[in-house]
Image (spheres, grey):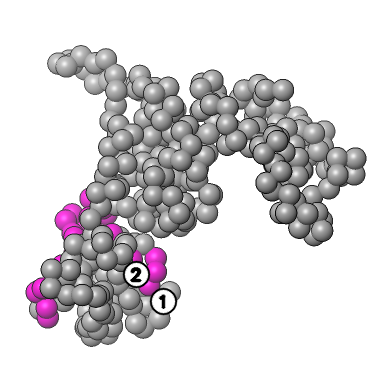
Amino acid sequence: MKVVLKVFRFNPENEDKPKYEKYELDLREDAVLLDALNEIKWKIDGTLSYRRSCRHGICGSCAVKLNGKNVLACKTPLKKAIEDFGEELVVEPLSNKKEKIIKDLVIDKKDFWDKNHKVKPFLIAEIDEHPKTENLIKPEEVEALEEADYCIACGCCYYACESLRENKEFLGPQALAKTYRFSADKRDNAKKERLSLVDSLGIGVWDCVKCQACIEVCPKGVDPFTKITHLHNQIFEEGIAKKNVATKHAEGFVHSIKKHGILDEGMLVLYSEGVNVIRHLPEAFSMFAKGKIKFPWNMPKSDQLEEIQKLVEISQTHELKD
């Protein structure tokens, strides 16, 4: 199989700017992207640098960007990649910002690991240091983790996150999914401590913009976005939600759906921000002109309002504040 790879190259120690080098390879039909990188390094250019280790999609080391999408090199069949992206495959580091490049496809992931460390990604519990039996939990308690424990910390979701592009303090989808992995574990004793951390504005769950890019790129099917949504619910269920614009916004959604069966966007902003809504008047006039918001007296109601209200009542996990 003929494969053409256009690979990002940059050595900040002796180069001023990055470049791309093209390699033409003849590989087996079942070759993956890591095979191609190995072929280049072992037979064509030994100076190419990239991370790799297990080759079985477990260590997460070989994550790179392929034609703009974050992937694991060891789990990406080249034949399928050519079908998806065309004959020329462009391989880049997860982040191509010059200050993050160590060399070629290897980046400095300190920010990623610092945030992973911040959420204490380990079980916190009083345990017997010399147990005689396993600390078993019920199958349904394992299912509650929803495969959050499958995360291999590859960084694919982190470096695809739109929130992080604008807010460097945001913990990111990987750290938040890891938080859920332990906050949902019946054996863990630090649930409220974890939830208090991710309830903080600027770094926590309320700063997710719901772009869902993390779902698309996760190679293990962890679905960090859904785990972030579960953390929202846990924060309210445990009664630790801080009163701020983010939590009021979440409650405003429920108020609106219970009242109308559909979202009242104008009142949602007013409910969330109170008197500070004045700063949004220009946007409000624009939305009103386009029919996006309505006055309270002519706000329509869903034809299935009664059924929707029953569903909200069944699923609601906490009482809303007046």
Asked which secondary structure carries label 1, the reply is helix
Mark-to-mark CA distance, 1 and 2 = 9 Å
SS at badge 2: strand
Quarter-of-image position of residue 148: top left
Which stretch appears magenta?
Answer: 44-69
Q: Where does the image place residue 245, in percent across and percent down from the top left?
A: 60, 35
Q: Is residue 295 visible?
A: yes
Q: Amino acid at mark 2?
A: Leu
Whether residue 285 sits left or right of residue 185 in the image: it is right
Q: Please name the residue that numbered disc 2 is placed on.
A: 66
Q: Indicate the quadrant containing the N terminus: top left, top right, bottom left or bottom right.
A: bottom left
Q: Position of residue 177 (x, y in %)?
A: 40, 40
Residue 1 magenta: no
**Horizontal relation, residue 172 to residue 251: left or right:** left
Residue at 90 percent of width and 40 percent of height:
297
Disc 1: which residue: 85
Type of secondary structure dominating the magenta stretch: loop
- The location of residue 300, given as percent across then percent down, is 86, 44
Tell me the residue at 38%/72% (across/down): 67
